[in-house]
Amino acid sequence: MLVLALKTQGLTKRFNGKTVVDGLTLEVPGGTVFGFLGPNGAGKTTTIRMLMGFAHPSAGSAELLGQPLGGALHKVGFLPDVPAFYPWMRADEHLTFSGELAGISGRTLQLRVVELLEMAGLGDVKTRIGGFSRGMKQRLGLAQALINQPLLVILDEPTSALDPVGRKEVLEMIARFSGETTVFFSTHILADVERVADRVGILHQGRLIKEESLATLKASYAQPQLVVEVTGDGDLLAGTLGTMPWVSHWNQDDNRFVLSVHDIEAAYHQLPQHVSHLKLGIRHLEVSRATLEDVFVKLVTQP
């Protein structure tokens, strides 16, 4: 596996004087699942269109698998946000057709089609593609993107518009083949990135505002939270939280408090003592796990 599967340097795209992608510089290590995260309109699809050669950059450069744009597309798999199929074909026919276009033939192609249909959960499906659900079409699209055994797979919003079952199936399929290839996928669904990605790049208004491993990103930017619900007069606790050195801020909803804290261990041990000192009781106490949503909101809203 290459050290870098994807690299951009100052990649920029302007439309009618408006900058849609602004000086994008990132590196995607080989063998990783890279979540390209951003709200709708952030420039994710435009970036992917440039990487795949569907749009010409206004400035900057990019490399796929160590080669300039266009030089390694035969080793790249691609799934657009809305894949198109011939509705009269069956899944096996479509994959066979795609494999032949990729220059694969004979027994090698037959085995590859069977393998990918099983991975996609479509091995026993004889229905024509026109009768497929959206989730089935997305899984078939993923299988098509893998037909040429690519070293890099680029997926544009692979779970958008899917119901929860369809999203689960697609994410499970990505997790299964991620060990075989580098995966670069764009999405605005934070939970999907958190479930399957190793690294994350956050795009906001065309600019990359952070690129980091998922674990490091959460550890660096998401403060742990302590959720506590007390019995008695909750305002007594609210009036004293400002004296606690490990509390950065808090939200109160009647007798329920969500505390953002600097030192979770100190908070978890000292808070019960403090509540007892106020002659209040604790109905519920838990540590809340930092989420990618916490990080995302903090990064895109900070000045």
Image (spheres, helix red, strand yellow):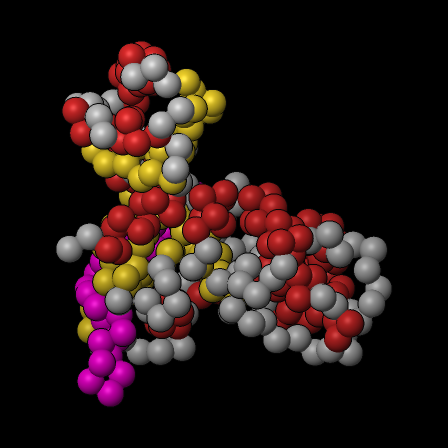
Q: Residue at x 30, y 17 (%)?
A: 278
Q: Nearer the viewer, residue 61 or 218?
A: 218
- Please tell me whether the stretch drawn in magenta is mainly helix, strand or loop: strand
Kindly tell me whether residue 71 is visible in this rendering.
Answer: no
Q: Is residue 147 above or below residue 222?
A: below
Q: Nearer the viewer, residue 147 or 162?
A: 162
* Residue for point 40% across, 77% down: 54
User: Is residue 125 toward the left or the right of residue 115 in the image?
Assistant: right
In the image, residue 164 lies in the stretch drawn in magenta: no
- Place of residue 6 in the rendered image (x, y in percent of width and height, measured from the top left): 34, 55
Quadrant into which the C terminus falls: bottom left
Task: Judge left or right: residue 195 versus residue 207.
Answer: right
Please tell me how many numbered marks the rendered image carries: 0
123 relative to 176 in the view: left or right: right
- In this view, the residue farthest toward the front is 233
Residue 208 sits in quarter: bottom left
Q: Is residue 14 above or below residue 291?
A: below
Which residue is located at x 46 percent, y 24 percent? 284
Image coordinates of residue 230 in percent, x first then y, are 41, 25
- At horizontal 43% and vertical 59% (from top left) the residue drawn is 188
> What span is in magenta?
5-31
* The N terminus: image quadrant: top left
Q: Is residue 79 left or right of residue 97?
A: left
Magenta-span inclusion, residue 27: yes
The relative height of residue 49 versus residue 186 in the rendered view (above or below) is below
Question: Is residue 246 shown to the viewer in this render?
Answer: yes
x and y percent of residue 43 in the render?
33, 69
Q: Residue furthest bottom?
A: 16
Of residues 186 and 219, the one nearer the viewer is: 219
